[in-house]
Amino acid sequence: MPLNEYDRRALLSWNAHVSGQVCLRLCLTRDPRSAALQTYAEDLRALSPHISLHTAFEDTDDLPGFFIDDSWIWHAVPSGAELRPFLETLALFQEMSAALRRYREDRLAPTLGPIRPDLRQRLLGLQSHRELLVFTAPQCPQCAHMLLELAPMPFITPYLMVRVVDALLCAERAQAAGIRSVPTILFGEDFRWTGRVNLAHVLEVVCRNESTELSAAAAIRLLKEGKAQELSRLMLSSSNPWRDFPAVLTHAEWSVRLGALVVLEELVDKDPLKAQAYLPLLWNNMDELPAAVQGDVVYATGIVGDPAWTERVFRWAEKQVEDSELREVGEETLNTLKRKKKP
C-alpha cells in the first residue's frame, strides 16, 4: 500500500526536522498483510534518508508489524491521522534513547521528554511487564491525539509496551475483541477505555501494584465503562480500604452511585470487614450530602451494616418528615438491620 500524496508531503516535512538515523524494524510473516507493510516500508525508506529499516521474516501466521525499539508495535500501515503519531514516535525514540540509557543507569536525568512528572513516576515504578492494546483507524482524529499523548510513555520504562492495531486493516482482530468504535485501549482481559480518555486514569490501572488504590476519578471512569466487577476485584486485592471510595459512593451522578453500590455488595460478600470500614466515612459527612445521596448512603448501610447501626439510621429517618421516599428507605434499612445477627 503506497503512500498517497498527502502522506508523502507529511513525511517530507518530518524529514526536515529530524537528524541522524532512526531505527525501524519490520517483521513480516505468512499473513497476507505483510505485502502491504513491505510496500509501505519501501516508500518510507525511499522518501526518508533518516529511517534505517531492518526487515526480518518469521514463519508464523501472526500479524506483521513495525517495531520501534521494544516499546511500540504497529500492526498497521500508518497513514492519514495515524501517520503523524507514527513519525513522532520514531523521532521521540531517537531523541530519548540516549537520555533514557543514562536515566536507567544512574537515575540522574532531570527530564525524560514531554511527559508529566507524576505520570513519569508511575511508569518508573513498574516492576513487571504490561502491554496496552490500542485499536485505531486512519481517519480518526481522536486516535491521533491519543497516540501522540501515549508516544513517550513506553520509552520511560522497559516494562511497558504499546501495540497498535488498525481496526480496518485487521478487521477480524477488531471484531474478535468486540471493538465498536475507536480509539479503544485494552489492558488484559478486564479493562477497556473507549473514546477520549484521560491517560492518567489508564496509567493508574496499568501501573498499580496489588496494594495501590485508585483515585476517585479513575474508579468513576471504570464504573462509567461498566467495569464494576473489575473495580471490585482491584479493591479486594488491596490490603486496606480505599480512602477515595466514599467520594464514588456519594457521586452526584446516580449511575455512578449505582455502580458503586454493586461494588459494595461484592465487597460485603467477599470481605465484609473491608466493606464495613466505609460506613463511618460515609456518615461523617451525611448532613452535607444532597437528599437523594443521603438515601443511597442509608441504603448502603443496610447492605453493609449490622444492628449496631440501627440507632443512627432511626435518628436520620425521624428527620425525613417531608420526604416519603426517604422515610421508606429508612424503614426498609431498619428492617434489614434488625434481621441481621448482632456482631
Image: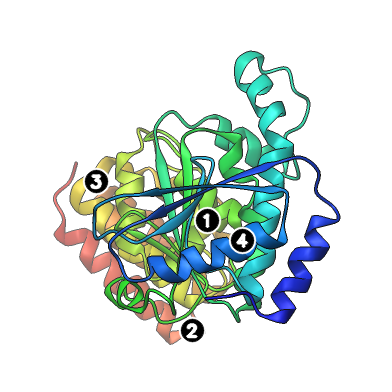
Q: Residue at x 53, y 75 (%)?
A: 253
The residue that mark 2 highlights is: 323
Observer able to see residue 281: no
Q: Earlier in the sequence, mark 2 or mark 1?
A: 1
Residue 317: percent from the left, percent from the top? 42, 70
Place residue 298 in its image quadrant.
bottom left
**Which of the pair 66/181 is nearer the observer?**
66
85 over 343 or under it: above or below: below
Residue 279: percent from the left, percent from the top? 40, 50
The residue that mark 3 highlights is: 272
Q: What is the spatial separation of the Cα atoms under label 4 and label 3, in whole angstroms?
A: 41 Å
Q: Secondary structure at mark 1?
A: helix
Left or right: residue 14 compared with residue 192: right
Tag shown at residue 180: none
Q: Earlier in the sequence, mark 2 or mark 4?
A: 4
* Within-10-Å neighbours for mark 1: few <14, some 14–19, many 20+: many
Left or right: residue 216 compared with residue 97: left
Q: Amino acid at mark 3?
A: Pro
Give the mark toward the camera: 4 or 1. 4
Q: Secondary structure at mark 3?
A: helix
Q: Residue at x 61, y 54 (%)?
A: 150
